[in-house]
Image (cartoon, rainbow, N blue to C red):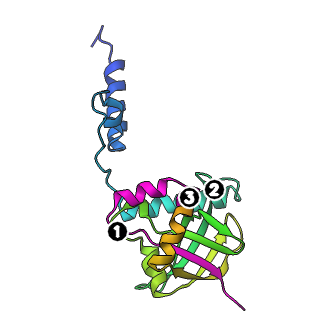
Amino acid sequence: MPGVDHRGARQKQFTSRSLAAFGTLEADFTRRPEETGPKKAEPMPSDFQLKICNAVHRSIIRLSDGTFGTTFKGMPTIALTTIGRKSSRPHTVILTAPIIEGNTIVVVASRGGDPRDPAWLHNLRANPAVEVSVGHGSPRPMTARVLPPSERNELWPDVVAAHAGYADYQEKTTRTIPLVVLTPVSR
């Protein structure tokens, strides 16, 4: 229509769609100062979304030859390969390692505070023989051990000290988030 500026309407429509794509992001931008109470728990990404994110992360590391994606929130990333407990196929996920001491690596099975354990944890419980590469390094065989409650509770403060977000994840879920220690296979 002549004399009608559609640019504002188009921009508003685009903004609404963009924000809606990110779920509760729109609500965060439109909160009033008096609405400062606790936010509702955000829904966890689906398994499919997590697999896509992991594939993209692995691709970034590979394509950049390790220049990008080998650290996240100040922690080194590792590629953990487990054998599927049902499929018997290898599955690789990118995880952060809040603690690395010598050849020993600690990973957190947080799944972002989801009430379910991550699939990789079920896989390594069934078969603790795993492969791990730190950063963009070569994969090496390691053994995974899920810490029993007493050892986990002793190490948990060190994990939270490395990245406080893990405490937030623990608060979001009723399950106790497991810690896994990865050690080199002795030859």
Residue labelled with disc 2? 71
Which residues make up the magenta segment?
Answer: 160-187
Answer above or below: position of 174 versus 82. above
- Residue in the picture at 36% in, 32% down: 29
Q: Amino acid at mark 2?
A: Thr
* Residue 57: mark in rendering: 3
Residue located at (29% from left, 11% from top): 4
Q: Tell whether 16 sits left or right of 62.
A: left
Q: Which residue was labeled with disc 1?
A: 175
Instruction: Give the residue at x 55% y 64%.
Output: 95
User: Mark 1: which secondary structure?
Assistant: loop
In this view, the residue in front, 80 or 20, is 80
Spot occupied by residue 96 in the image (x, y as percentages of width and height): 57, 62
Describe residue 19's horizontal placement relative to residue 165 as left or right: left
N-terminal of the pair, mark 3 or mark 1, is 3
Q: Amino acid at mark 1?
A: Arg
- Which of 135 and 185 lies nearest the eye of the viewer? 185
Q: Report the residue at 69% width, 89% height from top.
A: 186
Mark found first going from the N terminus, 2 or 1 = 2
